Amino acid sequence: VNIEYRWGRGDYATLTAAMRDLGRRRPSVIVAASSPAAVAAAKEIHDIPIVFTGVGGDPVALGLVDRINRPGGNVTGFVNQNAVLEPKKLEALKELVGAGRRYGFLYNPRNPNAGTQISSIREAARTLSVEVDLLSIGETGQIEAALEPARRDALSGIVVGADPFLSLISRDA
């Protein structure tokens, strides 16, 4: 068994090239461990089985499969419900902070699940009677600018969206 790894290091632009390279190598199967990787693989490779393991949204809405019960094509996999967890993160943060009324939601606009995450965090904010400022960051060079509103407006806390890039910069910060 030969296992080859490709890791985008949070840089979504490299995923397309990585998937194209894997397709040329003709593996028996490709395993994509995130929504961005799965989307890149599905766009580039149509004749090799692709199994996604870390898709945090609706694979039909992401264009990965035709239907949940019968995916069709060469793509199938497992869905985790990260987008569903965003409201729970906000709820836990509000409980920890107590009297806080305004929070930030740090998200990556390049993530295919960004729209779902934003919708779910906004709904949670309405339910919890708090405000949420959207803080967008898609590249390492945007960190300071993305966090400036949090400093300036003295937000009570920040929820970090589920995203490989954000996990990477959160870990390294």
Image: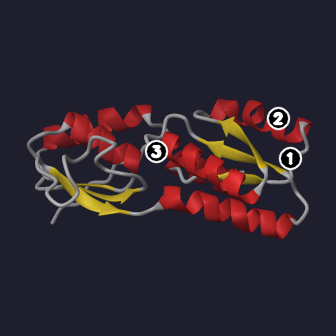
Q: Looking at the rendering, which quadrant does residue 152 occupy?
A: top right
Q: Could you say which is closer to the camera, residue 127 or residue 156?
A: 127
Q: Residue at x 70, y 59 (%)?
A: 90
The numbered mark, 3 or 2, whose residue comes first in the sequence reads 3
Q: Secondary structure at mark 2?
A: helix
The x and y percentages for residue 128 are 74, 59
Work out how far the residue at label 1 is from the one at label 3, CA to CA, in angstroms.
24 Å
The numbered mark, 1 or 2, whose residue comes first in the sequence reads 2
The x and y percentages for residue 4 are 26, 54
Q: Residue at x 78, y 54 (%)?
A: 129
Work out how far the residue at label 1 is from the one at label 2, CA to CA, in angstroms.
8 Å
Q: Secondary structure at mark 1?
A: loop
Q: Residue at x 40, y 34 (%)?
A: 14
Q: Which mark is residue 149?
A: 2
Give amino acid for label 3: Asn
Work out how far the residue at label 3 is from the one at label 2, CA to CA, in angstroms.
23 Å
The x and y percentages for residue 67 are 20, 52
Q: Which residue position holds label 3?
A: 113
Q: Could you say which is closer to the camera, residue 1 or residue 102?
A: 102
CB under 8 Å between discs 1 and 3 = no
Give amino acid for label 1: Leu
CB under 8 Å between discs 1 and 2 = yes
Can residue 10 be seen here?
no
The numbered mark, 1 or 3, whose residue comes first in the sequence reads 3
Can residue 106 be seen here?
yes
The x and y percentages for residue 95 are 80, 69
Q: Residue at x 67, y 30 (%)?
A: 141
In this picture, is 123 found above or below 42? below
Give amino acid for label 2: Pro
Q: Which residue position holds label 1?
A: 155
In this picture, is 13 found above or below 42? above
Side of 9 where 52 appears, left or right = left
